[in-house]
Image (spheres, rainbow, N blue to C red):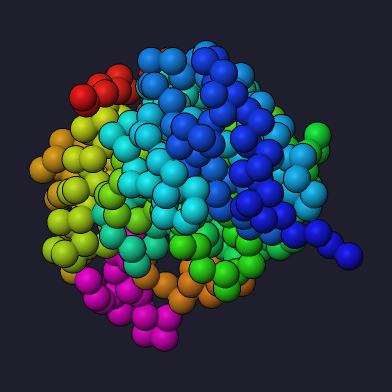
Amino acid sequence: MNVMPTKDKIIDELRRVKTPDGRDIVGQGLISEIVIQDGKVYFSIAVPPEKANEFETLRKTAERAAAMVPGVKAVMATLTAEKAGVKAVSGAAPRPGKTDAHQAHGLQGIADVRRIIAVASGKGGVGKSTTAVNLALGLKANGLKVGLLDADIYGPSMPRLMGLSGKPEIIDGKTLIPMENYGVKVMSMGFLVDEETPMIWRGPMVQSALTQMLRDVLWGELDIMVVDMPPGTGDAQLTMAQQVPLKGAVIVSTPQDLALIDARRGVSMFKRVNVPVLGVVENMSYFLCPQCGTRSDVFGHGGARHEAERLGVPFLGEVPLHMTIREKSDAGLPVVATEPDGPHAKAYCEIAARVRDQLKGPGHAPPRIVIER
């Protein structure tokens, strides 16, 4: 019979973990809301940001303590700069803080991963994830070793888009082996929870999950990791941009004015955290009738190009609105991998080549984080 871990049992074990002054971390209110999902445990520990490095040992000790509870398969604890409070332990998650302890001392990248880029959009529904998948495959077609991280915790789509199912293997009780298809390594929250399970986590738990998928995955040697960002420009997106040493960002937009307004916000967000914008992609740029060959600019045309010029960032290319792209994506058969000689694959590969050319040179250092007091 499977034993299900409970929050109370985990809290009892965490009471054994002491800070340097000899007091337990639960009694001091340092533990955030504890989330348990399929035997995997997530929580945050509040520490002074200037002491993040010395509290790293305490974080590992807390993970080992929680792992002692019967039924726990894996534990992920992160350090946060915000005081969690006792109420957080009993169920109310804390509000995301101004900064995170990982940010305070800078995430120094992932071993053997040379470059990390983000694919982002100011709003949902513009084909960002489909673009991220085909961009990653286009980079592989351009001769690079590529990984794909699905950072959209609330709406993970990589398992379906990449034609993957099942759960990743776990080694040494903690490290995940990424799934792989079409020669690209993939990690997504969609591998860890059922497709129809709603993710109702608040900020700190999202940060914990993202950190785990970066830090506790055996990515191996990669020339580039493509991160499919959540849509929008909220706290989760800003935190991801600050925590990960991004080489640059690709912004996806459709041509109509409303989408361009949101794309503008996306460009501004990355500029705020000193992440270079590699360029803008105009998705669903036009529709070419498969019967008569007539071209229709359903959402207008050229808006993303003009916006890129106005903002002073590169325009990477346009991708048409076409049934083949949609059907192949829904079936887990992305066009770059399954129709490499087709016109749609050519469009994505040309965009990938432009991104690759901009990534030459030294890596981009993480942004400097100023802690507000």
Percent across and percent down for residue 78 are 52, 34
Up/down of 201 relative to 248, above or below: below
| Residue at (45, 37) in percent of width and height | 29
Residue 294 visible to an observer of this rendering: yes
Q: Residue at x 80, y 49 (%)?
A: 70
> Which secondary structure type mostly characterizes the magenta part of the structure?
loop
- Relative placement, left or right, of 242 versus 150 is left
Residue at 52% in and 15% down: 21
Which residue is most to the bottom?
Answer: 291
User: In this picture, is 240 found above or below 262?
Assistant: above
Task: Give percent across and percent down for residue 99.
Answer: 33, 31
Residue occupying the far left of the picture: 310
Depth check: give the residue in front, 146 or 68: 68
Q: Which quadrant is home to the C terminus?
A: top left
- Image coords of residue 212 (percent x, y): 58, 39
- State yes or no: residue 56 in magenta: no
Where residue 123 appears, as percent x and y from the top left, is: 28, 60
Count of numbered labels shown in the rendering: 0
- Name the quarter where the N terminus is drawn: bottom right
Residue 286 falls within the magenta-colored stretch: yes
Q: Is residue 278 visible in this depiction of the protein?
A: no
Quadrant for residue 37, please give it.
bottom right
Along the line of sight, which residue is nearer the eye, 299 or 55? 55
Residue at the spot x=56%, y=28% of the render? 24
| Horizontal arrangement in the rendering, residue 180 relative to residue 158 (left or right) | right
- Identify the magenta region: 282-299
